[in-house]
Image (spheres, helix red, strand yellow):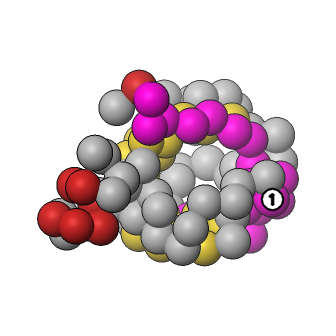
Amino acid sequence: LGPLTVTGSFTSVANRWQATDSSRTEAVDWFREAPLTITSGPNEGLVRKVIEFEAGQWTFGEALPFDLEPGDTYSVPAGCMRRFEEDCVAKHA
């Protein structure tokens, strides 16, 4: 998944299960069902499934144990909702 994995940092945080990276421009649900890994801050190393992604806003399937801060970083591959045309062919080739 290397070529389909992106990194970034959160620009704003709503709570422990919702955060935004205003630099993300991918389509709605591009990262849905993907494992997002926190790569800095008190949640470093933790992984949460993305259950919703739209306009740079991430919603996780489970709250993080510690507050996220703007500037905390992450890594995440493109998601897969197990749809043949939309995911297997169009996203993952």
Magenta-highlighted residues: 3-22
Task: In the rendered view, tell whether residue 57 sits above or below residue 67.
Answer: below
Task: In the rendered view, tell whether residue 11 sits above or below residue 85.
Answer: above
Left or right? Give the position of 29 relative to 58. Answer: left
What secondary structure predominates along the stretch shown in magenta? strand
Residue 63 image point, x, y percent: 49, 62
Q: Of the residues shown, which amino acid type is indicated by label 1?
A: Ser
Can the viewer see residue 50?
Answer: no
**Circle 1: element type:** loop
Return the residue nearer the eye: 9 or 16: 9
Residue under label 1, please give it.
22
Return the residue nearer the eye: 59 or 80: 80
Can the viewer see residue 32?
Answer: yes
Q: Is disc 1 surrounded by few (<14), some (14 to 19) or many (20+) residues within 10 Å? A: some
Left or right? Give the position of 50 relative to 86. Answer: right
Quarter of the image with the N terminus is top left
Return the residue nearer the eye: 15 or 87: 87
Residue at 60% across, 60% down: 26
